Amino acid sequence: MASLPAVRRLEAAGFRAWPAETVEYEGSWQKRLTPGHATRRANCLVPLDPGDTRDIGERIDRVEAWYQAAGASLVVKQTPLCPPQLIEWLGKNGWRSEGDVSVQTVTLSDYAQVTGLDMIPSHDVARFVDACIAVEGGKSRTPRAAMERLFGALQPETGMFILGETSDHPKAVALCVHDGDLAGLQQVAVAAEERRQGLGRQITVAALKWARLRGAVTGWLQVETANAAALALYAELGFKETYRYCYWRREKA
């Protein structure tokens, strides 16, 4: 069983590390909306109280209408904070789960003497977005302008790491959000032609060392459970799972 206080803390850190443009509430259910951005994290309903179970069907109808009015589809995020009654209702009413994600943490004191590449992060959002798109082979699902808005909206101290920044073809990217005693790793990616050379490990260690020097105590990240290579890397680096989440989407008729 996941510790609910730990889940609440990491979910709150996740909201700050991946902000939505619009946030509203239906009771304790958080409605997150970011037009133009493809990620579910910035466009989903997040129930935050296991005891908030009143009028589930009516409230889902209202929330679904709210998303439809904004030109978006409703996606429900299931974490350990989600009421079991809501998940049961979704399962009985034509919804299906997808995208199992592991939320993992590591103690950053383990990185006190770690050898590896020391990197100075960029704080240039436009340059980092260019590198992200290049690493993805120029095929990002999210338009450039939406990426710039999201990264530019980050309030905690943020390091934007780029391997191969001075070349025409960046090799890897990582975003590290230093938020009090937490350091959240986001947007970790290695160019397809540069994989299996240890670059993911290099940039991850560099980002964590940077955050630790600024007072972070715990590193955290989110990784899809289908990504075996990333899971193996993070296990090697000492990350351990704290909880999992997934998404629910209405099945198409």
Image: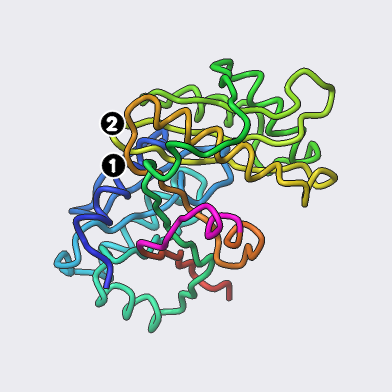
Left or right of 88: which side holds 123? right
Q: How crowded is mark 1: few (under 14 residues within 10 Å), some or many (20 or more)?
A: few
Left or right of 137: which side holds 224? left
Question: What range of the chain is rendered magenta?
Answer: 233-242
Relative image position of residue 20 (x, y in whole percent): 41, 37
User: Which residue position holds label 2?
Assistant: 180
Relative image position of residue 72 (x, y in whole percent): 50, 49
In this rendered view, identify the residue nearer to me: 248 or 220.
220
Foreground mark, 2 or 1, reads 2
Q: Which residue is drawn at 51% across and 27% down?
A: 151
Q: Residue at x 48, y 32 (%)?
A: 209
Mark seen at residue 166: none
Is label 2 in a helix, a strand or a loop?
loop
Q: Residue at x 79, y 36 (%)?
A: 138
Q: Which quadrant is the N terminus positioned in?
A: bottom left
Mark seen at residue 24: 1
